[in-house]
């Protein structure tokens, strides 16, 4: 038993040395765990601490002012605009500036004083069903508190003093599937797109075929373009499959243009491929390429707005999402698919995606030229 135990210990020691002898491997084993635990703790939360809303106040009465004061005093609801009509709220909701539009009727106080029910309309941005549902619960809690106060002061009227009529835009029933499935059109292709490009050069290094490419008339830029086009095509095909499942299997209706949707996907996929090529140029072997890819994918998913809204994240993490192509890819696809947004509307999402591609593609070419030639 003792010789077998000694051999086993020696073999374990050898395996540990193989893993730990490379400083890059030691860093990869420790840092991702720390970073991902912090990201999970701050970003992966469904708590809603900030609800920007617009107020349509047709009744400038004391009762209406008291109800609005209750909203503003919660510390959760922030009034960002006062509108003359609900029609003016459309651009605010589309641009994501408000999550909620609160419309008070012109006869609000008269109905309350008569003991009748005053109907308050709440318009929610249903593109993120979880956030909208939570905001609706907070809204109802404030109204319930206001109703309790009115009953205490007026001796419990027969009807409910104030009733909220909720309406959700872009997702009438606040179905979670309507929120997730369009986002998956962009996000499900991300892992394989990154992995294919990250492994492209690392695989050839290990197989010894990359040296053969260097002696051909191809320049590093041409090699980079040739390695980028297949993953871009594969990523678009995968997104197409998810889109077909979303539309025809889960029956999530598409409101926008197919051409606009593919323009969004093309910009997103090119940006993702640029990151993958940069990983491929940095990684020394396939193992490092795979590790770096998996380390990056988890934070990119968490900081994309796929499950939790970016607006609820801490300021530092919100700034970190600006270099995450998945955030803008999901936002653009959701808006096209659910809103029916046109090319001009989603164009602001193209700017950071183009910036990421314009940085990562030349960076990959520079790394190819200076590390391999």
Image (cartoon, rainbow, N blue to C red):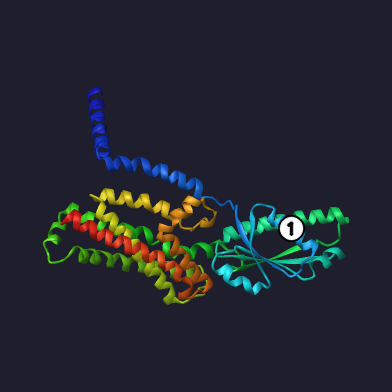
Q: Is residue 65 left or right of residue 272?
A: right
Looking at the image, which residue is at 51% across and 67% down?
Answer: 250
In the image, 77 versus 288, the foreground residue is: 77
Mark 1: few, some, or many residues within 10 Å (few <14, many ≥20)?
Answer: many
User: Where residue 278 appears, x then y in whole percent?
Assistant: 29, 57
| Farthest residue, direction right | 155
User: Along the horizontal axis of the image, is 106 left or right of 189?
Assistant: right
Q: Position of residue 66 (x, y in %)?
A: 77, 58
Residue in the picture at 59% in, 63% down: 98
Check disc 1 and report its element: helix, strand or loop. helix
**Figure quadrant of residue 141:** bottom right
User: For the point 55% across and 69% down, which residue is it?
Assistant: 94
Quarter of the image for the N terminus: give it. top left
Work out whether residue 170 can be spotted: no
* Drawn side of residue 90 relative to residue 115, left or right: left
Q: Residue at x 31, y 58 (%)?
A: 276
- Residue 258 appears in the picture as rendered: yes
Q: Is residue 366 above or below residue 265?
A: above
Tag 1 residue:
143
Total numbered labels placed on residues in the image? 1
Please provide percent x and percent y for residue 157: 86, 59
Which residue occupies the foreground of this view, 371 or 41?
371
Side of 275 where 185 appears, left or right: right
Q: Image quadrant of residue 16?
A: top left
| Closest to the observer, 148 or 353 | 353
């Amino acid at each position: 038993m003792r010789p077998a135990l000694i051999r086993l210990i020696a073999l374990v020691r050898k395996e540990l040395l193989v893993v730990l002898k490379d400083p890059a491997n030691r860093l990869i084993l420790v840092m991702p765990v720390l970073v991902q635990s912090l990201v999970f703790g701050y970003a992966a939360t469904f708590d809603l601490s900030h609800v920007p809303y617009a107020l349509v106040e047709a009744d400038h009465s004391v009762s209406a002012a008291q109800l609005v004061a209750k909203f503003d005093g919660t510390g959760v609801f922030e009034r960002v605009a006062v509108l003359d009509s609900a029609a003016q709220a459309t651009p605010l909701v589309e641009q994501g500036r408000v999550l909620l539009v609160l419309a008070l009727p012109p006869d609000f106080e008269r109905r309350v004083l008569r003991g009748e029910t005053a109907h308050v309309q709440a318009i929610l941005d249903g593109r993120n069903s979880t956030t909208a549902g939570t905001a609706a619960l907070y809204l109802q809690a404030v109204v319930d508190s206001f109703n309790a106060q009115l009953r205490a002061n007026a001796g419990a009227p027969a009807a409910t003093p104030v009733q909220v009529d909720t309406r959700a835009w872009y997702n009438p029933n606040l179905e979670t599937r309507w929120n997730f499935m369009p986002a998956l059109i962009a996000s499900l292709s991300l892992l394989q797109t990154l992995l294919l490009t990250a492994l492209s050069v690392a695989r050839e290094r290990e197989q010894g075929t990359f040296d053969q490419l260097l002696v051909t008339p191809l320049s590093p830029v041409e090699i980079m373009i040739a390695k980028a086009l297949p993953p871009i095509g594969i990523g678009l095909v995968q997104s197409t499959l998810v889109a077909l499942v979303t539309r025809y299997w889960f029956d999530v209706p598409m409101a926008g243009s197919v051409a606009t949707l593919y323009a969004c996907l093309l910009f997103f996929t090119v940006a993702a491929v640029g990151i993958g090529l940069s990983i491929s140029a940095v990684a020394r072997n396939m193992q490092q390429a795979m590790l770096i890819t998996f380390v990056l994918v988890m934070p990119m998913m968490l900081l994309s707005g796929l499950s939790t809204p970016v607006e609820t994240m801490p300021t530092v993490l919100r700034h970190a999402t600006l270099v995450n192509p998945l955030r803008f890819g999901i936002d653009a696809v959701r808006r096209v698919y659910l809103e029916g947004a046109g090319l001009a509307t989603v164009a602001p999402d193209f700017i950071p995606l183009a910036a990421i591609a314009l940085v990562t593609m030349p960076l990959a070419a520079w790394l190819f030229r200076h590390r391999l030639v």
